[in-house]
Image (spheres, helix red, strand yellow):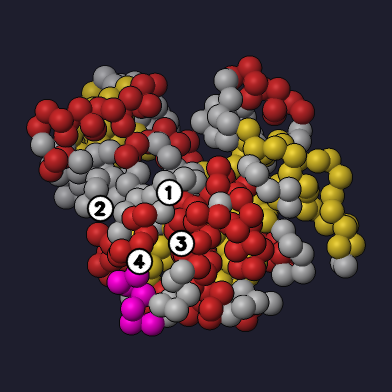
Amino acid sequence: MKNNTYILIMAGGVGSRFWPKSRNHFPKQFIDILGMGKSLLQLTYERFLNICPNEHIFVLTNENYSDLVTEQLPAMLKDNILLEPSRNNTAPCIAYAAYKISLLNPDANIVVAPSDHLILKEDIFLDKIKQALNFSSKNDALLTLGITPTRPDTGYGYIQYQEASIKNQEGLNEIKKVNAFMEKPVLAKAKEYLKSGDYVWNAGIFIWSANSLKKAFEQHAPEIATLFESGLPFYNTLDEAKFISEKYPLSPNISIDYAILEKADNVYTIPADIGWSDLGTWASLHAVGEKDIDNNMVNLTKINLKDTNNCIIHLPNDKAAVIRGLDNYIVVDDGEVLLIYPKSDEQEIKQVAKDMVNEHGIKYA
């Protein structure tokens, strides 16, 4: 199975809710946001080396980040860094990789994963991925790793699944048939989902064979299938970059959820408690990070805090700071932009970043 396993790490996003640390020129996946000496991309890449060899790992990123990927992942094969000339959401980039990889190996099984998520229980995660790969290699199935919810969170999409597990050649396992994908709910509905016990969070981690995915595109998103199928003479040749540069921007801007998963009837999920966080906001980082006695998460040692509680403080390593009288605040200094903002209002930060660009120029994007 390992010889047929391929990984697609999606690393083209901007991470605008982590502004100003995450900016267009250096987005979240390339930052050592956890203070571990490695970026989120590097941690994701190393995690998947336990699943397949280096030459089977692909990174899909925006063409502006080619040098960053090469710098942070020096062992990556150059041909395995797939560059998108435009941001057209997840369906086109996944289709591109599927058609390219299927030429390399018609029996390929592909794991698709974001580059910027935190997974604390890596052993359990790897076990679930292997279980999914075993199933997808023997069945025409589209799988998603569903995160067992720990709270009625309104910031995630939910997946409802059937209670009974699916039997295969190995007997009963943890794979569940998906009934429906649910949009981000209001709080009352999220509480219902949590209480029912048959919902998981949609983490955007997918497992399928290249053949099953191509079949799904042909059936549910024929425009995407036709476009990327036309590239078969060019993939893995010197003409691939020219084809992608010309044709990729013509693909529809649509997520894999809308294009395929919400329409297909062969979708399955594996509920998983893997210590997962999408690290989508400063508050989510504060929730999982190491904190001091006053519940502050601080990334440097030359700091004097007084009457300060429940804050996340992320400053340049060579900076000293004195802070007094803050409660439940985000304090971020990227060297060019300083943000001091109530943590309870952090959903506004994306708009704040847009306002800064509109008022003071694109350099602040």
**Mark 3: secondary structure:** helix
Name the residue beneath numbered marker 4.
244
Q: Secondary structure of the magenta portion, mostly?
A: helix
Q: Quadrant of residue 283?
A: top left
**Mark 2: secondary structure:** loop
Residue type of the residue flagged with mark 1: Pro
Q: Decide which of 294, 258 is in the foreground and name it.
A: 258
How far apart marks 3 and 1 lie (CA) works out to: 10 Å
* Residues packed near mark 2 inside 10 Å, few (<14), some (14 to 19) or many (20 plus): some
**Mark 4: secondary structure:** helix
Q: Residue 322 placed where, x, y %?
A: 19, 32
**Mark 1: secondary structure:** loop
Q: Residue at x 62, y 47 (%)?
A: 261
Name the residue beneath numbered marker 3.
227
Which residues are drawn in magenta? 237-244
Q: Quadrant of the C terminus?
A: top left
Seen in the image, is 333 located left or right of residue 200?
Answer: left
